[in-house]
Image (spheres, grey):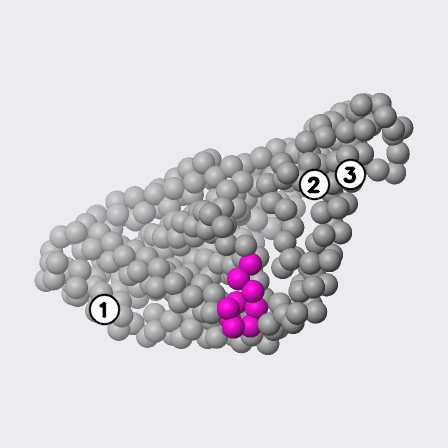
Amino acid sequence: MNLVRAEVERLAARRFVQLMLVLLALAFAITTATTLVGSHQPSASEIAAAEAQLAQVIRGMEADHEYCLKVKAGEVPVDENKYLPADCSETDPVLQDQLPVVADFLSGVFVFGQQAGPLLYFLIAFLTLFGFLVGASYIGADLNSGGVVNLLLWRPRRLTVLGAKLGTLLGVVMLLSAVATVVYLGTFWTIAQAAGLPGRLDGAFWQDLGGRYGRGLVLVLLATALGFGIATLGRHTSAALGAVAAYAVVWELGARLVFEILDVARPDQLMLSTYVAAWLAGRVELYDDQVCRNSTGFGFCDGTYTITWAPALLVLLALAGAVTAASFAVFRRRDLI
């Protein structure tokens, strides 16, 4: 317990961590100010106009559904200028997962129910960067300066010391992420009440937002462990930064270009960014143009394929787990001086 408390104090005292916290607060302030400037409380005339547009859209959906039923029943001829689904339930307003609301037709108004998801993704992106950089600098600076050697003189158990560092780091990042999320979303909830609209906040909304946040928090922790592991293997913070830069340039950009030239099938499956996107969104739909290249008919070929959150999570866990395990194995045996 004394080791964990000491690591918390060392982590809190690092200037880089303090700088990142300042940048986090600055990003919050800029986003909040931008939202406040771009939003206003809708007037009665704006709401009335939006309600009229909504009613018109609903009537149009009902007319499309009625037209589909009549065509299927043979009561009216097919109009080539109108969309005719195979199943009329696709156009039935009653069976739609989500109907439009008044807030959809208001411009210049911040609606919490519509913007909370994208704003949460922005927070997750910053926290992921925060966790990776802090994790890399936290262990990298200690290894480079000899701080780990001094710590081992007090607690001469390498794996215990490294495990305490990683566990403390993950715990602090998780706690900070939870506090930042409450403050962040609470601020925009207040803005919606004072200078905007709450929007649709039903059970489906909170379930979706909670799912996004849970997946985002897992990504933040995995990125933190990844930065910690790479810096441990390279014995320096720059090792983690260099590894990410090299991967982005050599693989995500360079290899993708080579795959396109060689006409490799489904190159997105080989990119880590694809699995990050699939994990955060729950699923990602991609297109393979080779599937329909030799197809002979129009409208009978579907080249889309989907990557869901389950394989994406396995890939991310395998990467972070392999790097972390390798860092512990190397740290156990190598010379630290």
Reading the image, the residue beneath label 1 is: 10
Q: Which of marks 2 and 3 is in front?
A: 3
Tell me whether the residue at label 2 lies in contact with that at label 1, contact meaning CB atoms closer than 8 angstroms.
no
Magenta stretch holds residue 206: no
**How far from the left and from the top, in percent, is residue 48?**
69, 64
Q: Residue 261 carries which label?
A: 2
**How far from the left and from the top, in percent, is residue 219?**
42, 50
Under mark 3, the amino acid is Asp
Figure quadrant of residue 14: bottom left
**How far from the left and from the top, in percent, is residue 167?**
25, 54
Name the side, left or right, on which 68 lies relative to 31: right
Q: Is residue 29 visible?
A: yes
Q: Nearer the viewer, mark 2 or mark 1?
A: 1
SS at circle 1: helix
Q: Work out whether residue 174 or residue 261 is closer to the camera in this orientation and state it.
A: 174
The magenta stretch is: 191-199
Under mark 2, the amino acid is Ile
Name the side, left or right, on which 102 lies relative to 24: right
SS at circle 3: helix
Under mark 1, the amino acid is Arg
